[in-house]
Image: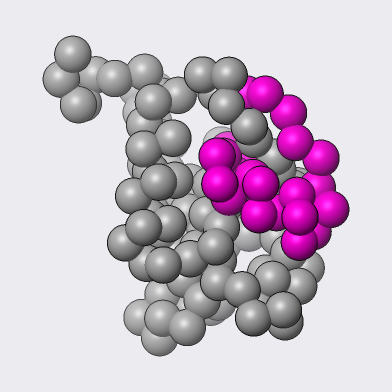
Amino acid sequence: MDKFRRPLKEKMLEMEVSIREEFGVDAVMIQKGFFYEAYLDSAIYLSRVMGFNTAKGLHDQLMTGVPAGGLMTCIETIEGQGGRIAVVEQIEKTSRKMRRELRYVTGDSALNINNLVIEYRP
């Protein structure tokens, strides 16, 4: 199956792993509607640091999440404890696809807190 036609579930898991490795962050939060979700090692980290519950989600892998209104508290808590986080936001939705962008990475001056949208309107 070519990489542009893979199921969304696979893309989300791959996005989490590649961003975490490339930017050396402890957690990646990916926006899905009015929630920010974390998968795999990010879910484990957020469970430990933030006390979030985890559940089996994509491909039977661990996941957790926070409503959009709680994202800033999550970022502040993680960074206050010396952790690093990356945030991927939904930028635009068409009838056929969802465009997401990496909008924030702890300590990256090009991707700073002012880039976050926080509010999503489908």
- The structure's colour scheme is one colour
How many numbered dots are placed on residues in this image? Answer: 0
The residue shown at (41%, 81%) is 108
> In the figure, 46 relative to 104: above or below?
above
Residue 121 is situated, as x and y percent measured from the top left of the image, at: 60, 43
Position of the C terminus, as image quadrant, is top right
Q: Is residue 14 left or right of residue 26?
A: left
Tell which residue pokes out farthest to the left in this image: 2
Residue 10 is situated, as x and y percent measured from the top left of the image, at: 39, 26
Between 28 and 90, the residue placed more toward the observer is 28
Tell which residue pokes out farthest to the top in this image: 1
* Magenta segment includes 59: no
Q: Quadrant of residue 98?
A: top left
Between 114 and 62, the residue placed more toward the observer is 62
Q: Is residue 49 left or right of residue 31?
A: right
Residue 84 is situated, as x and y percent measured from the top left of the image, at: 55, 72
> In the figure, 106 relative to 18: above or below?
below
Q: Is residue 33 visible?
A: no
The residue shown at (62%, 23%) is 57
Q: Is residue 42 left or right of residue 9?
A: right
* Magenta segment includes 35: yes
The residue shown at (72%, 79%) is 81
Position of the N terminus, as image quadrant, is top left
Magenta residues, as a range? 32-57
The residue shown at (29%, 20%) is 6
Q: Is residue 87 visible?
A: yes
> In the figure, 23 relative to 42: above or below?
below
Residue 67 is situated, as x and y percent measured from the top left of the image, at: 75, 47
